[in-house]
Image (cartoon, rainbow, N blue to C red):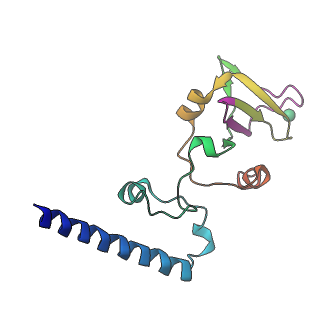
């Protein structure tokens, strides 16, 4: 019984050592630039939860200021097309969902306003999986074409 579990532990330790070595190799030969924004697939996170380096770990909702997505088609809320009260724009929004679950809209011209009729649940239903992390708002806006 004890010998068995010791063997299992040795096997796991060998696996971990192999994985650590792999990480080291990656650090010495960094991946090309275009993959650095990608998030490690959830499967590998589940497999080795303690061993992903911080920059590969998926931040939790509490660790980011908010989420953002581009919304190119007209945005219909309660059966009405939402227009920007400042400039009348009605399409090509950036939609933000902030840490406090509030949803904000930013029109093409850069007018930003909170939209109380939308919330985090709406955002989650309508957004795709997060595939990129931005260190600044400007970087995110640039990436989304604004
Ligand atoms: Zn506007």
Q: What residue do we see at 86% from left, 35% from top? A: 111
Toward the left, the furthest residue is 1
Is residue 146 toward the left or the right of residue 36 in the image?
right
Could you say where residue 110 lies in the image, as x and y percent from the top left?
85, 40
Residue 29 appears in the rendering: no
Is residue 144 toward the left or the right of residue 41 in the image?
right
Magenta stretch: dominant secondary structure: loop
Q: What stretch is highlighted in magenta?
A: 82-102
Asked which quadrant contains residue 76, the reply is top right
* Magenta residue check for 89: yes
Asked which quadrant contains residue 135, the reply is bottom right
Q: Please say if 30 is above or below 77.
A: below
* Magenta residue check for 86: yes
Give the camera-side residue of 138 and 107. Answer: 138
Ligand 1 placement by image quarter: top right
Q: In the rendered view of the protein, which quadrant contains the N terminus?
A: bottom left
Is residue 71 toward the left or the right of residue 122 in the image?
right
Give the camera-side residue of 49 and 61. Answer: 49
Could you say where residue 69 lies in the image, as x and y percent from the top left?
66, 43
Residue 138 appears in the rendering: yes
Q: Please say if 6 is above or below 84.
A: below
Q: What residue do we see at 53% from left, 46% from top? A: 129
Q: What residue do we see at 35% from left, 58% from top? A: 47
Toward the front, the furthest residue is 2
Q: What residue do we see at 25% from left, 66% from top? A: 9
């Amino acid at each position: 019984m004890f010998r068995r579990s010791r063997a299992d532990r040795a096997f796991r330790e060998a696996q971990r050592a192999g994985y650590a070595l792999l990480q080291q190799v990656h650090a010495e030969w960094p991946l090309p630039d275009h993959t650095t924004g990608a998030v490690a697939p959830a499967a590998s996170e589940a497999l080795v939860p303690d061993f992903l380096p911080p920059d590969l770990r998926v931040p939790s909702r509490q660790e980011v200021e908010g989420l953002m997505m581009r919304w190119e088609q007209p945005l219909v809320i309660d059966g009405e097309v939402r227009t920007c009260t400042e400039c009348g724009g009605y399409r090509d929004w950036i939609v933000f969902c902030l840490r406090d679950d509030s949803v904000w809209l930013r029109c093409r011209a850069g007018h930003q306003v909170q939209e109380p009729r939308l919330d985090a649940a709406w955002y989650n239903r309508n957004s795709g999986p997060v595939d990129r992390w931005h260190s600044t708002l400007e970087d995110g806006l640039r990436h989304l074409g604004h």
